[in-house]
Amino acid sequence: MKEEIVNRVAQSKLVTFDLEELYPEGKRIVLDIKDWLYEGFILREKEFRTFVKEHDWSQYQNQYLALSCSTEAIIPGWAYMLITTHAAPFAKKVVVGDLEQLESSIYQDILSSIELSDYQDKPVIIKGCSHKPVPQNAYLMATQRLQTVAKSIMYGEACSSVPLFKRK
């Protein structure tokens, strides 16, 4: 007599939280402003304002925009603010930083507004493998949010998970 193979994972109350499923579509762009600076290092206000005014901001329609400067120039805060006033009507989001900081900011918005009632008092596994560029910070943010409602939190896959948190 053969014993029936039982899938204990499928029968468990374990709920998977997959950050990749939350990944919003949209092109991510880094705008390096070094070419808008005199010799790549000095921000001259009049010329800078001209570059910002004449730039085609419509090219960022429905895209995510990270503003940066690849030189060691000291950029005053108002410069990025000025750029944002022109980019914001087109871009989905504008941040100062690199693509990782942009992704972290996108996930922060998503995770702060997500409904967590499906995870209330349940064992949750935060899925570890991802084919999309989910930033490390997103895993931390998800853990913090889930910790307020979940019975327990694990990381990885159901067959090989790492326990992280268990409510007492």
Image: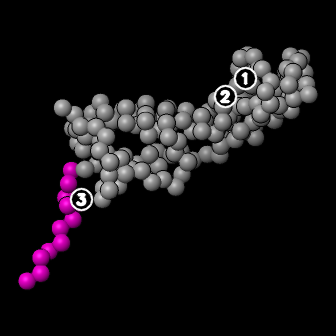
Q: Which mark is residue 80?
A: 1
Q: Residue at x 75, y 25 (%)?
A: 83
**The disc labelled 2 sits on which kind of residue?**
Val
Magenta part of the chain = 1-13
- Give the quarter of the figure containing the N terminus: bottom left
Secondary structure that dominates the magenta span: loop
Q: Earlier in the sequence, mark 2 or mark 3?
A: 3
**The disc labelled 3 sits on which kind of residue?**
Val
Q: In which quarter of the image is residue 34?
A: top right
Q: Distance between the residues labelled 2 and 3?
A: 43 Å
Q: Earlier in the sequence, mark 3 or mark 1?
A: 3
Above or below 10: residue 41? above
**The disc labelled 1 sits on which kind of residue?**
Tyr
Find numbered disc 2 in the image and state the secondary structure of the residue it sits on: strand
Pointer 2 with pointer 1, Cβ within 8 A: yes
Dot 3 corresponds to which residue? 9
- For label 2, the crowd category at 10 Å Cα-Cα, with few meaning under 14, some 14 to 19 and many 20 or more, is some
**How far from the left and from the top, in percent, is residue 92?**
62, 35
**How far from the left and from the top, in percent, is residue 16?**
33, 49
Find numbered disc 3 in the image and state the secondary structure of the residue it sits on: helix
Q: How many marks?
A: 3
Queried whether the magenta region covers residue 131, the answer comes back as: no
Q: Residue at x 44, y 40 (%)?
A: 139
Dot 2 corresponds to which residue? 96
Q: Confirm whether residue 25 shows in the render.
A: yes
